[in-house]
Image: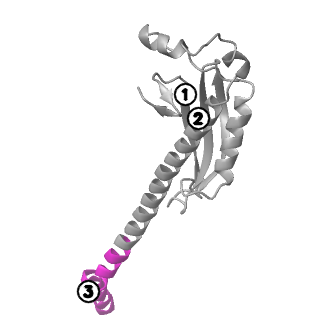
Amino acid sequence: MEISKRIFNRLTTRLHNEEGSLSVVIIGLFVITVAALMVMTDVATVMVAKRSLAQATEAAVMRGVHTLDRASYYTGKGTILTTPLALINDRAHPSIPIDCGQAPSDIVLELLNWSAADQSMKRPELQRIDLVDFSCDGTSIEISTIAEVKFPFTIPFTHLSSAYLSASAGSTNQVQEGFYLFGIRLH
């Protein structure tokens, strides 16, 4: 009986002893802080990669929209008085025609340049950029792209090491109003 009472007293003394409990709290807070920093780093990486993908998509659509359909563009009967008469009559210029057959290859070439380039705008975490949707009506282009972004850290308590991002952009090539003298817009 005396032995069991002594064992009981030792156990209660050890359970009520608070020595070393602060180190457990500090270790727990450290683990939570490191996990939060890893998640914030991954979120920041995704945000920067998303902007880089948007810039690549915009650059590709601008390259595609500048693919001139020469046959349609040069069939008009413009003269030296066409622009001044359009300004006087307040007539809008038509859109510049786009070669919808050549534009996709120019867009893919621009996306490949972005994927392979070591530019400051392209993030190294952003993997190959792919064209997933292309729409051209002869005067405007709309595209959608997708790319994989690799996380610097695997998200704690998961097995996620990457995510897929998408971006869309569209553009129309319009003639700007005004009078140009040696490439300088005067009006």
Quadrant of the drawing holding the C terminus: top left
Q: Answer with left or right where residue 112 lies relative to residue 143.
A: right
Q: Position of residue 36 (x, y in %)?
A: 40, 62
Give the x, y percent position of residue 72. Answer: 69, 16
- Expressed as whole percent of the image width and height from the top left, the position of residue 55 reads 53, 43
- From the viewer's perspective, is 40 left or right of 169? left
Q: Which mark is residue 171?
A: 1
Mark positioned earlier in the residue sequence (1 or 3): 3
Whole-Å distance between the Cαs marked 3 and 2? 76 Å
Q: Secondary structure at mark 2?
A: helix
Residue 62: image tag: 2
Quarter of the image for the N terminus: give it.
bottom left
- Mark 3 residue type: Thr
For the stretch drawn in magenta, the main secondary structure is: helix
The question of residue 153 being in magenta is answered with: no
Mark 3, mark 2: which one is toward the viewer? Answer: 2
Q: Nearer the viewer, mark 1 or mark 3?
A: 1
**The magenta stretch spans which residues?**
1-28
Query: What's the residue at 54%, 32% (across, down)?
Result: 169
Kindly indicate whether the residue at mark 2 contacts the one at mark 3 (C-beta within 8 angstroms): no
Which residue is at the front of the view, 77 or 106? 77
The amino acid beneath tag 1 is Ser
Residue assigned mark 3: 13
